[in-house]
Amino acid sequence: MKLTIAEKLSQEPKLWRKQLIIVFICLLLLIWSSTALKVQKTDGSGIAVALGIFKGLVHPTTSLLFGMGKTGVAYLLLETMCIALMGTIVGAIFAIPISFISSFNIVPKWLGIFGRVFIMAIRTIPAFVYGLMFIMVTGPGPFAGLLTMSLCSVGMLSKMFIEAIEDLDKGILESLDAQGCTFFQKIRYGIIPQLLPSFASTLIYRFDMNLRDATVLGLVGAGGIGAPLIFAMSSYRWNDVGAILIGLVVLVLIVEALSGKLRTKLMRG
Amino acid sequence: MMSLYDKIFKPKVYTLSNGKQVSQKRSRMPVILILTVAAILISAKVTGFSLTVLVSRISYFFVMLKDMFPPDLSYMARVWAPLWDTIKMSLLGSVIGALLCIPFALLASTNLVKNKVVTAIVKFMFSLVRTLPTLVAALIATYIFGLGTLAGTVAIAVFTFAYCGKILYENIETVEMGSYEALGALGCHPLSCIRYSILPQVLPTYLSTVLFCFEGNVRYASILGYVGAGGLGLILNEKIGWREYDRVGMILIALFITVVVIESLSQWLRSKLS
């Protein structure tokens, strides 16, 4: 049967009713959510504040930016990097067992679901609540920061680890079994080579994210560059804010570029 | 650098049975391992990491958690309003950010804009905005717009803008350009070429990115309250300050249930999209 173009066009499924309903629901949600906005400042002083902030950001305090002491940006950035690195590593130590007991191809379904709910519960608690809890353990300082960061990393790390574990090729294990390999040989030659690249890539990515999120720790005085940044902001020292932000942004951009390169290399093997 | 490594540690040479020689490069694992261990040791020194403190005092971590149970159920009546505020903030912020990023993402795509300078500038702007910590954006927003949900919405919009924008332009750059060129050859305006050839290709991924971002934003919005940007974080901060941990527990449970509901909803929607 031959159809003309017009006939073919008329056979197109009629989706407009469905689409109209979706658009209507979206609009309704938007209108509903816009009720949350209450404009509090109406005197227009916001623009003056914004200008002041902008001026401060482009005129950073150079003594702070290039200072080499313990209050200089360089040391703060080093501390932040150390917190992010240790946070990622400790987070991974927590995340690896959790993700093994949440992978459906290893454990029974009920245990897997329990593990996933547990991960979600860990993820829900905001970072500053963990920060306050850990400060009770270690006192304020970078140690509390790295522990907080590790718990915050667990959620995302274990999610990615679970995906990697569920993608495991079991055929390799069976062939190793057939050759008479021992349990540890199976892990060494069958499982680790499969998991290591994706685990390493996840860790590098999480380190990148942790560096970016490190400011959150400053809220509770848990070390790193966050606390001086927040102090400077709340006392309107915008030049100092500019110096710290420039240091942080440059570092994050460099680390991001490096980690992207490393990760593509890992993925290609 | 790696070729130097091969010169120091000579590759292992095997002679096959037919007399041919093959070489296997030495594993790089020792170098990577040494570097990693060194980095960890330095970090542990700088951060004052101490296992003994952790083991001997870890019980204090659970002091606050223990006080949260049983949660003060009667307090739930007062949680509803800020909870809805948080959801509204993230919804509105996500939508504004996601819509705003579209024109910039188009400008950043090298296959649509031939001018290399323009794409480089827009791409750099995206990564600059992305590195700006959300908390800093929220604090600046509270100074400009005053305390409240507007500041939180702006902060979320800024974050969503940068995140969705990056994913969107990366996606646009990988679309199949044949239909775009065909429409152009037929004499369509570039905008309608985009509408009929690029849009259908990127729309599902774009929508699923926005939904994913919205999911994360609900969780993030609970932190923003800490700097006075409205929502659940505001009362959370207040109750922690007053040490009313049973109420903190109630707030966290409410947040947990909300996050679970929104995540399952958005996962269902995303599975429909793909």
Image (spheres, coloured by chain):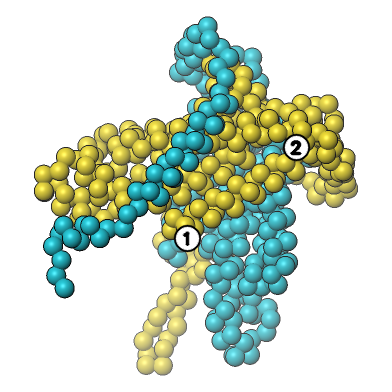
Task: Please say whether residue B232 is visible from this viewpoint.
Answer: no
Where residue A129 sits, quadrant-wise, is: top right
Q: Quadrant of the N terminus of chain B?
A: bottom left
Q: Is residue B184 above or below residue A114?
A: above
Q: Is residue A233 above or below residue A148?
A: above
- Do the residues under discs 2 and 1 have CB atoms within 8 angstroms? no
- Image disc number at residue A266: 1
Residue A248 to residue A130: above or below: above
Judged from the image, the secondary structure of the residue bearing numbered disc 1 is helix
Q: Residues within 10 Å of mark 2 (few under 14, many from 20)?
A: many
* Residue B178, image x, y percentages: 20, 55
For residue A252, the mark is: none
Name the residue: 80% across, 49% down.
Answer: B51
Total numbered circles: 2
Is residue A22 toward the left or the right of residue B180 in the image? right
Q: Colour of chain A?
A: cyan
Whole-percent x and y of residue A241?
56, 21
Q: CA distance from mark 2 to mark 1?
A: 42 Å
**SS class of the residue under badge 2?**
helix
Q: Please name the residue shown 68% across and 30% down the image.
A: B81
Q: Amino acid at mark 2?
A: Ile
On screen, residue A236 above or below B157: above
The amino acid at mark 1 is Leu
User: What hue does chain B carry in this figure?
Assistant: yellow
Q: Quadrant of the C terminus of chain B?
A: bottom left
Q: Position of residue B150 (x, y in %)?
A: 55, 23
**Which label number is shown at residue B251?**
2
User: Which chain letter goes with mark 2?
Assistant: B
Q: Is residue B208 left or right of residue B71?
A: left
Q: Disc 1 is attached to a residue of which chain?
A: A
Q: Tell me the residue at 50%/46% (across/down).
A: B211
